[in-house]
Amino acid sequence: MIDTLRAQLNERWPELRPQRPPLTGAILAGLDRTAYGNLTFIFFDENGQTAAVAKVPRAPGHEDALRREYEALGHFWATGASAVRQHAPEPLALERIHRRLVLVTSAVHGEPMTTRYHTPGHTSDPRRVEADFDAAAEWLSRFQTETFSGLASLGRDTFSRWIGAVFERYRSQVGWGAREAELLEVLSERAADLAGSILPLTGVHGDYWMGNLMIRDGRIAGVVDWEFAEPAAPPLRDVYKFPTSYGFYLDRAYPEGNGHVPGHPGRQDHLGKWSRFGDWRNLTGFGHAYFGRGWFPEQVRRFVLDQLTRLGITPALNGIFFPAFLAEQALAARDPASRKGYRSLLHAFAEERDSTWLWREEVAHERG
């Protein structure tokens, strides 16, 4: 497949990348093992420089994600936003090569944040973790500022569009029960109490987690995988995604620790407490991040509230938009185990919401 792709790309290379050296070598850089995933190839030019990235779906029927990513990148590159042009792949082509749809983009540089995240000791050091959060916040602030498109207010119509529609899709695609029904009712009540609250509309990356962030010299050098991006929407999904994913995998560098992670006392306590909601391994990390105590849960809290302050969003809206975020993540999950796992997080939030600052209004308004 590599030889075929290289030959086809080289035929169009003078058009796609004028005055750039032709492609010579390539490696298979990524293999998503799910049926819905992609093969990712990195191509090098004759000078040995990374020149292009090509994504090919593993199964021919799963091409919509490539189309969404191509359209999203095209939109954001056209805005001229420096956060995009300096850090996101440039879309070069979307075409069929030997009956397979292929997305070709420029390459971005840096190493995935997950490389150092999974290094033993990294996530046990508050200073290193804070540096990761600061780097993520810096780029996100630039992106949201440069893609700002206006303001909207919370009301019946906007609640239906941003929250109700998510739960309707969740009901039809994921499942429904008493927990979800009761949660949606209380979200509607809170939205009525907060009617008129202002929300900025900005670009949304949609999958803003460590694996999609490339680091160089302590700063974000690249942001990849834009298939869930939106041109203009409330920016809370990206605000929640980074700390949520960061909290999920703290134990992965310590597989024999049974949930215990050096530097995170009390994290393992959530292993038993949250088991009634399911057996998804990420439940423990979720509980620690949003319901736990210690320097890491405080880092998560500070990150979210600082972003909301910057955006001019009242923290009371966390209680509405955070559960909708969990429902969206369940919808976006490609495999049944992850979809079931995110449903278990939504159930946990629904039952334990009074125990988190995300819901408690008296805590949410501390900075108001």
Image: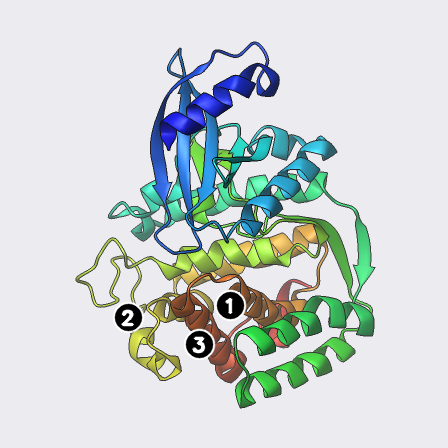
CA gap between label 2 and label 3 equals 18 Å
Tell me the number on the disc at residue 268: 2
Q: Earlier in the sequence, mark 1 or mark 3?
A: 1
Q: CA distance from mark 1 to mark 3?
A: 10 Å
**Image coords of residue 65 (percent x, y):** 55, 50
Q: How far is mark 2 from mark 1, CA to CA?
A: 24 Å
Query: Between residues 57 and 348, which one lies in front from this camera angle?
Result: 57
Classify 173 as above or below 203: below
| Residue located 55% across and 90% down the image | 178
Query: Pointer 1: residues within 10 angstroms few (<14), some, or many (20+)?
Result: many
Q: Which badge, 2 or 3, comes first in the chain's sequence?
A: 2
**For the residue labelled by badge 2, is the local secondary structure a helix, a strand or a loop?**
loop
Report the mark closest to the observer, 2 or 1: 1
Residue placed under numbered mark 3 in the picture: 344
Which residue is tagged 1?
Answer: 330
Question: Residue lying furthest bottom in this view?
Answer: 178
Asked where in the image residue 14 lies, by quadrant, the reply is top right
Disc tally is 3
- Identify which amino acid the numbered label 3 is placed on: Ser
Query: Of the residues under marks 2 and 1, which one precedes in the sequence?
Result: 2
Going by the picture, which residue comes out furthest to the front? 98
Q: Is residue 130 above or below residue 344?
A: above
Please say if the residues under marks 1 and 3 sit with CB atoms less than 8 Å apart: no
Image side of residue 5 versus residue 95, left or right: left
Disc 3 on helix, strand or loop? helix
> Does residue 292 appear anywhere in the picture?
no
